[in-house]
Image (cartoon, rainbow, N blue to C red):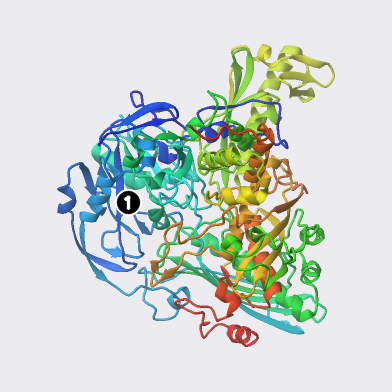
Amino acid sequence: MRVTCTVNGSPAAADDVWEGESLLFVLRERLSLPGSKNACEQGECGSCTVYLDGVVVCACLVAAGQAQGRDIRTVEGVGDCGTLGTVQQAFLDAGAVQCGFCTPGLIVAADDLLRRVPRPADAEIREALAGNLCRCTGYEKILDAVRLAASQRPGGVTDGGAG
Amino acid sequence: MTTVPGTPAPTAPADLATVRGDTGVGASVLRPDGTLKVTGEFAFSSDLWMADMLWGATLRSPHPRARIRSMDIAGALKLPGIAAVLSADDVPGRKTFGLEAADQPVLADSQIRYQGEPLLIIAADHPETARRAAAAVTVDYEVLTPVTSAEAALLPGAEPVHPGGNLVRHVRIRRGDPQAPADIMVPGCYQVGMQDQAFLGPESGLAVPAEDGGIELYVATQWLHVDQAQIAVSLGMPEDKVRLVLAGVGGAFGAREDLSMQIHACLLALHTGRPVKMVYSREESFFGHVHRHPATLYYEHGITADGRLVSVTARVYLDGGAYMSSSPAVVANAATLGAGPYEVPNVAIDVYAAYTNNPPCGAMRGFGAVQAAFAYESQMDQCARRAGLDPVEFRIRNAMSQGSVMPTGQVIDSAAPVAELLRRVRDAPMPAPPRPAGAAGPDLRELPGGVSNTTHGEGVVRGVGYGVGIKNVGFSEGFDDYSTARVRLGVVAGEPAVTVHTAAAEVGQGLVTVQAQIARTELGVDRVVIHPADTAVGSAGSSSASRQTYVTGGAVQAACAAVRAVVFGLAARRFGVPPGDLSLAGGKVVSQAAGVLCELEALLGSEVIEETVTWRHRPTYPLDPETGQGNAHVQYAFAAHRAVVDVDTELGLVKVVELASAQDVGKAMNPLALAGQIHGGTAQGLGLALMEEIQVSGGVVRNPSFTDYLIPTILDMPPMKLDILELADPHAPYGLRGAGEPPTISSTPAIVAAIRAATGRPLTRVPVRPDDIVLALPARGDDPPEPPADLSPASSCALWAAGRG
């Protein structure tokens, strides 16, 4: 089947999609966007977190057909026109990246948190990121990164979504 | 290596990452690959893609022990899109592989020795087609009763898993008089479950047939050259026809030391003449790599009434599973480090690894030291209790220090600040006490059970516990443990630039960062490029054993020194100054007497200086087979933890409130990356303490998924305090001490000790389960530990059980 959708602001189409494929597979293998990761492919690790119509989802749990006509934003679309987004820069500066396999999902999840809650308390950060597994960092530097990104965003200003 | 002309190379992950900045050794330099990793552009091994590539899949045995009567692949071959179905008959070279002995079949041909053992490999145009083809193969198995207990496997008459019997290795250590009289004897029996490395990036890679008949493999691994050697012999090719490039590695922790899909992808690519990509699913990953050895550990310490260690007797059984992997080295670690970081004059330690039909076990962060530390640290708490001493005070009285003698007779010849580490974690400020269940109510997120709303503070008890551990750094027992570095200095775009080329695997730890820092410090050059790791340069050894900053760092430092010597020779001739008077700084050649002589680019012109150095640490030596005496290790590393926990004693739920650690690292090469290593290592130790276990029943894995195999989330991890000591090791580059593994070793026993302090339960097994806390039942499982009849401290388990509340 053919799947058409908007990905990172641009129209995208994938042909010859087998009905059993996930949105994650379509992004990674058919649309040349391997940034969303495939650590568990059963919705446990959060490494494939993307925005679907402004709501964060695990792309591995979205059937390809469900993406038809929808608006998708991936880690590749989180930055600002070729420069790193605030969350991306904060992950880099705080030392929140080691192997980096969990990083794309965490970037999207943290970006979503800060859009909803510009000044999250630690407990809110932990709750928001509890669906994203990281095996390298023990999460301390990830907390630092989200705190840093929060401190660098205009206070109280959100743009209301991902789209 | 260079790619074959005409072959479009997949994007290499470290694509000549350029590192800029004026920061060298000791600075918190940011990762050169960090930008690509936060944008999603970094190419992990599972991200590689080529036009016309096929997907590989593996058919694995559902049975842990069986004979293969026949296989019928006709159903698979009928499916459209299938390019190849290969069996053991299609392996052109050696049909087995392995790190220490080639005992593991590339593809099983007659015997199945563990659940998940590969039988067939398939290439197809879509991964789902390949999986369906695997499902369409009919295999006629004669299912056999598996051998599932390491201890039982070593008893006389046990069914042999391999023709040579079930003993993988026994290391025996004897020092002093293990029967020396002591005032108090303290027995104990402990168990450690099978832990998984659970790296997030699944086993994966892309094999590309080369025009010279060879193969190129882009793969996530810990050691390119040991992969290359094993692949080449199984393909029946010379090593120079098998060229490996490190693809992006999504974590390793030991699980990528052994081969997984490497030979399989190469076989399929060579057979089809097309690139073949293989990516394991998470479930397959649980069967695709070795795990941490489960262990049963019988200990008995003798102490004086005033709290001095007199003796330790230990028998440890490690379940090696179906194949050898690195079990012999794990046995050596558990044995030589089995008395812990303590002065014990009289020692009898025996450690065994056995073959069983359980999943193969091998390397995981901590490598034998983890299992021993859970036992000896639990014993230290028992000894302290029996001596009427505080657990930290008891440890400090017996702590080893520089000059102490290991049970192997090896003298610790650099800093061993065990007592200081313990004092530091003891004296660190305590976290705030639990909030009383007042009118406002406690924040559920701070309580055991969290927002499950299982308690508002009722039945919650706080406990504090301590642990300290010891780990060897680098490969041991006389292994030729070297690394190779090629450093090139030239002028690029009018400024001096350095390229560092090694085969060392960046697995997330930050090796690419520290290599560049070393080059900047040694050559005074700002612009440093890290070449992608590949087999075009000599071996760097494994990214394991906390060794790469030491050994590859040493090689890069030495290669830079060789380049520098050439530069000084040029400058000495040109300026008529003695080379010994020269230094490099800020891209300039500086003379002690005359100040700045010239810019480097002016001195070099079009000249390129390239030096390749193979660097070795001090030699180590084998252990005496009878006494276990010998200078087996090159360096020892130490870390301590204090754990503060809140336990819901009614439900057995644990919330770790805080972990404080102290560690001596000799030299903090990159403080930011170092903190990440300690945090991450501590987290893996928490996982072993509280939740992580591959549950194996009758040789069958019951929880091969992240739904059922739990690793710590950000909600499980507490805030962590770090206290870093930098006591230089005069034998190591920059005085550094390997740092990656020690925090994994000491956090587990500290957390369990804290739960014991809160509950009074014996907790002799990790991971601690809720019913261990609530019911304090004897250890469950297939094979409850019953010491073999010839075990001298045979009564220890019974005594231990009798002492239970």
Looking at the picture, tell me which residue is in the foreground, B645 or B103. B645
* Rendered image quadrant of residue B275: top left
Q: Residue at x 67, y 72 (%)?
A: B458
Q: Quick one: which residue is furthest to the right in this view?
A: B593
Looking at the picture, tell me which residue is in the foreground, B46 or B455. B455
* Rendered image quadrant of residue A62: top left
Residue A22 percent coordinates (x, y): 35, 43
For the image, the number of numbered tags is 1
In this picture, residue B670 sits left or right of residue B164: right
Looking at the picture, tell me which residue is in the foreground, B162 or B409. B162
In this picture, residue B476 sits left or right of residue B1: right
Residue B43 sits above or below residue B564 on the image: below
Residue A104 sits above or below residue B618 on the image: above
In this picture, residue B610 sits left or right of residue B416: left
Q: Residue at x 37, y 26 (%)?
A: A11
Q: Quadrant of the N terminus of chain B?
A: top left
In this picture, residue A133 sits left or right of residue B423: left
Residue B424 percent coordinates (x, y): 80, 58
Q: Quadrant of the C terminus of chain B?
A: bottom right
Mark 1 chain: B
Residue B22 percent coordinates (x, y): 71, 26
Which element type, helix, strand or loop, lies under badge 1? Answer: loop
* Rendered image quadrant of residue B176: bottom right
Residue B425 percent coordinates (x, y): 77, 59
Residue B117 seen in the current view: yes
Residue type for callout 1: Arg
The residue identified by callout 1 is B94
Q: Residue at x 41, y 31 (%)?
A: A7
Residue B236 seen in the current view: no
